[in-house]
Image (cartoon, rainbow, N blue to C red):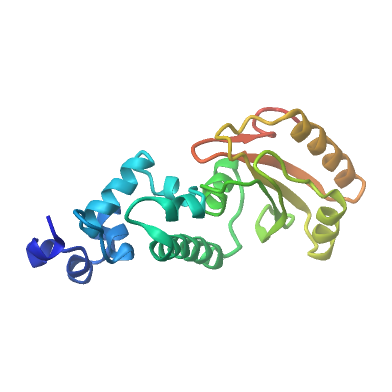
């Protein structure tokens, strides 16, 4: 059905202004970004097809290679660019509105805070969370960006940033695009090296948390320290 053939109250754009964006389903929001459909498909039909291709999950679209997304029938470069730009704006909004000041008591707090930054990425990133003596977050910094299977834990850079910011504790965070948060041998070895280096600089490594889209692994919780 063409969107113009729908009742005005059910058209995604009109529904958004009438009831607010939170009232729209994922497919309806995607249809607004797509703006138009293609031959035989409305924008809403195209949106639903795209979601079906990635198991109904928005994060699946975010994880799509840009060239692949643009190659999908009915999408093309302009629509793919609109979708990718919207996803990135959402990620940046989360980062900019995520103020410090939270006291960390459990690794799940870190998982919830960092997941919007790392969910759906096709590459690994290493982040550091700086805390004061009361375990309150001072700053959150991205340290390195790697490939699909590894990233570098830059020990000198981590210690330098920690001391520059007067951190008493640090928590290391990185993601596993593979979907499994289980640490690799390299993860374990590099974490041990970082912990030893921190102890020599009067900074304590509280935890290293590995995040996948649905799960996380805490070195501290798993007694890996």
Q: Work out which residue is located at the far front of the displayed protein and give it.
A: 39
Q: Is residue 196 left or right of residue 100?
A: right
Q: Quadrant of residue 98?
A: bottom right
Residue at the far right in the pictured view: 200
Give the vertical position of 175 relative to 100 (above or below): above
For the point 22% across and 68% down, the residue is 13
In the picture provided, is 168 more to the left or to the right than 26? right
| Image quadrant where one finds the N terminus | bottom left
Query: Which percent across, then down, holds residue 133?
Result: 74, 55
Depth check: give the residue in front, 105 or 3: 3
Residue closer to the observer: 134 or 163: 163
- Front-most of residues 30 and 105: 30
Q: Position of residue 35 (x, y in %)?
A: 28, 66
Residue 202's x, y, as percent? 88, 50
Q: How many marks?
A: 0
Left or right side of 203 for 39: left
Q: In percent of the image, x 68 and y 31: which residue is there? A: 183
Q: Who's the residue at 13% across and 61% down the image? A: 10
- The image shows residue 193 at horizontal and vertical percentages of 86, 38
Position of 143 relative to 209 (above/below): below
- Answer with the quarter of the image where residue 142 lies: bottom right
- Residue that appears at 66% across and 45% down: 174
Place residue 103 in its image quadrant: bottom right
Quarter occupied by the C terminus:
top right
């Amino acid at each position: 059905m063409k969107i113009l053939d729908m009742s005005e109250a059910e058209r995604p754009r009109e529904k958004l202004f009438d009831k607010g964006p939170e009232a729209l389903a994922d497919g309806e929001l995607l249809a607004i970004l797509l703006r138009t459909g293609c031959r035989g498909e409305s924008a809403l039909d195209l949106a639903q097809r795209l979601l079906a291709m990635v198991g109904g999950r928005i994060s699946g679209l975010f994880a799509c290679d840009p060239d692949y997304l643009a190659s999908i029938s009915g999408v093309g470069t302009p629509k793919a660019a609109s979708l990718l730009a919207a996803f990135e704006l959402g990620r940046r909004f989360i980062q900019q509105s995520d103020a410090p000041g939270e006291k960390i008591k459990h690794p799940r707090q870190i998982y919830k805070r960092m997941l919007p930054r790392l969910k759906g990425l096709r590459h690994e990133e290493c982040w550091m969370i700086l805390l004061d003596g009361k375990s309150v977050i001072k700053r959150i910094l991205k340290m390195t960006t790697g490939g699909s299977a590894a990233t570098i834990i830059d020990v000198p850079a981590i210690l330098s940033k920690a001391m520059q910011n007067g951190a008493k504790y640090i928590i290391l965070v990185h993601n596993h695009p593979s979907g499994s948060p289980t640490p690799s041998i390299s993860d374990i070895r590099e974490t041990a090296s970082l912990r030893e280096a921190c102890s020599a600089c009067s900074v304590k490594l509280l935890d290293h948390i590995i995040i996948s889209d649905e799960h996380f692994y805490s070195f501290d919780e798993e007694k890996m320290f």
